[in-house]
Amino acid sequence: MKSIGDRLKLIRGKKNQTEFAEILEVSRNTLLRYERGDSVPDSRLAALICKEFNISTEWFLFGTGGMHGGGLRSGKDASGECACLPGRIEEDENGELKVPVLEDPEPDNYNWVPMVEAELSAGGGSLVASERIKDYYAFRKPFISNIATAPKNLVLMRVSGDSMDPEIRNGATVMIDLGRKRIKNNCIFALGLEDTIIIKELERLPGGRVRIISKNHDQYPAYEADATSLRIIGQVIWGDRLYPI
């Protein structure tokens, strides 16, 4: 199968999109974007799909190996960030789980994506104090080549605010492809607005207009703007988030 979208259709089988979306706890439009290849499932959803349908993660993410294999295998997480770890997660004599640590990862197997200090606002707007690089995060090359225009076009940013809730929650980390600036319906983009950066879903309208949409419709109504007035930074192509601890 050529893409994650193709493999997702195969997993869906004879179920209709609405029924399958309910199982995955996403909207039908989100599922449609996945199947078209406009975006890919985040790590949480990929893990859910592999567990729910007994799918090999290796096959689902990269199209290699057999289709069925029992969820997360080979020591990789569902985003493809981690290398294959030696050994297994097992209990010691005290009943504590011991997690094997990868001591010497091979850098050539990864693309290194910068995390920048700027925060994306998913709310009323936050000042962009800096866009300096804070750190670099490793993603396996097959994962990046499957979703991005080029590794050099990628940055990671944190999200602040709840206007894109529940699809992108406050505190999430998202990956932005700076090489994708053409407006596509049902896709999420990072937009420069004066001294802030916001993330919104965009929809093309007649007459060169664009509808700017928040997922939290009740608190943040959609509005329209002239397409030429938008400064599109890039498209959000992947996302994950921190959970309360």
Image (tube, rainbow, N blue to C red):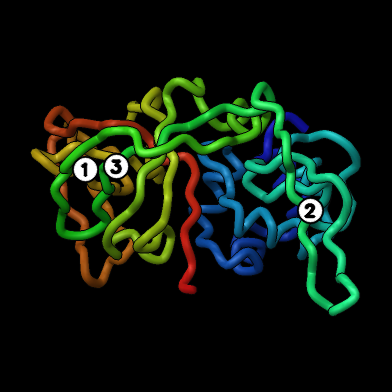
User: Answer yes or no: do the residues labelled 3 and 2 have beta carbons within 8 Å?
Assistant: no
Residue drawn at (84%, 78%) of the image: 95
Residue drawn at (42%, 50%) of the image: 173
The label number, if any, that marks residue 100 in the structure image = 2
The label number, if any, that marks residue 117 in the structure image = 3
> Can you say which quadrant of the picture contains the N terminus?
top right
Q: Secondary structure at mark 3?
A: strand
Q: Residues within 10 Å of mark 3 (few under 14, many from 20)?
A: some
Image height check: is 69 above or below 205?
A: below
Q: Quadrant of residue 218?
A: bottom left
- Residue 193 placed where, x, y %? 14, 40
Q: Residue furthest front?
A: 93
Q: Amino acid at mark 2?
A: Pro
Q: Nearer the viewer, mark 1 or mark 2?
A: 2
Q: Secondary structure at mark 1?
A: strand
Which of marks 2 and 3 precedes in the sequence?
Answer: 2
The label number, if any, that marks residue 197 in the structure image = 1
Mark pair 1, 2: CA separation: 39 Å
